[in-house]
Image (tube, helix red, strand yellow):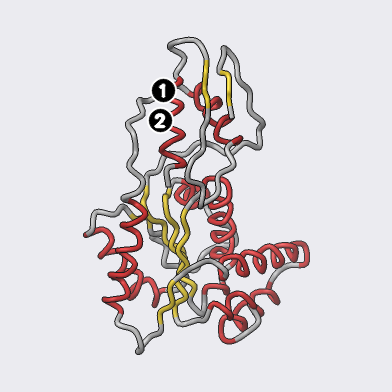
Amino acid sequence: MTFQLGASSSSSSSSPSIHPRNHDVFFSFRGKEVRHKFISHLNSALRQSGIKTYMDGVDLERGEQISFELFKAIEESRISIIVLSKNYAESRWCLDELLKILECKKIMKQIILPIFYEVKPSEVRDHEKGCFGEVFTRLGKKIKLDDMKFLEYWKEALEEVAKLSGLEYIAFGDDESKFIRNIIGWVNSRILKQTSLHVATYPIVIESRIRDIYQHLSLERNDIIRMVGIFGVGGIGKTTFSKDIYNKISS
């Protein structure tokens, strides 16, 4: 695969933006009980291990639409940890977060860790079983007719995330501290593989060229070697492009 870089380069308006990795872990979860117990303990342990986390600070009932700041935080995270508790599917906000996370997995190769917190993967996958299914059904009855299409998007997203390799936690059956240590080990093993190269600040015009190259890369998780040739006159930023793209795909 070879790209030539010259004086001009264009990209479509639908091209994904190039985002810095400002957070190691983004948390997606639902409910005060989960926040103040499991998530609080996990977040504290991760931070003590030197892992940069992002946790939404809103405890109040969320509105209908996810905020731009949260979308941005998801895009700027290396890993998303999705805590699928029994009340996760009652929130349109959480389900929209899930759609965004899966989009980042597809486009930006973001790493995802689903945690099935007191629910079974089969309940999430079928989204009609158990407490998880009951909650999702109630949400469906509240959706306006014009927004019914989102139900199908959410169902597909729940099916997809339930098929991913994740961790299960059963209250009163699992040792929470040991479970959290397992998560920290999992996260550390992924973060350590992502040694970033230093990239100097570059002007916006170069960002569009990086985006062009990045969009043409089709990488799978099991790919071991991929050779990309970048050629052009000296001084136009080939090394900068290469380092920046490496930082985005090295995981």
Considering the image in quadrants, where does the N terminus appear? top right
Question: In the rendered structure, which amino acid carries the disc numbered 2?
Answer: Lys
Residue located 31% across and 70% down the image: 182
Q: Are marks 2 and 1 in contact (CB under 8 Å)?
A: yes
Q: Quadrant of residue 246?
A: top left
Position of residue 35 in the picture relative to residue 226 (left or right)? left
Point out residue 224 in the picture as x, y percentages from the top left corner: 47, 45
In this view, 45 is above or below 220: below
Give the quarter of the image for residue 89: bottom right
Q: Position of residue 147 (x, y in %)?
A: 73, 63
Q: Residue at x 58, y 19 (%)?
A: 4
Residue at the (51%, 64%) spot, across then down: 62
x then y, percent, for residue 192: 31, 50
Looking at the rendered structure, the number of numbered marks drawn on it comes to 2
- Closest to the observer, 155 or 184: 184
Q: Residues within 10 Å of mark 2 (few under 14, many from 20)?
A: some
Q: Judge whether 203 appears above or below 167 on screen.
A: above
Return the mark for residue 239. 1
Residue 197: quadrant of the picture: top left
Residue depicted at x 28% and y 70%: 181
Q: Secondary structure at mark 2?
A: helix
| Placement of 207 over or under 157, stated as above or below | above
Residue marked by disc 2: 243
Label 1 sits on what residue type? Thr
Position in image of residue 51 (x %, y %): 29, 54
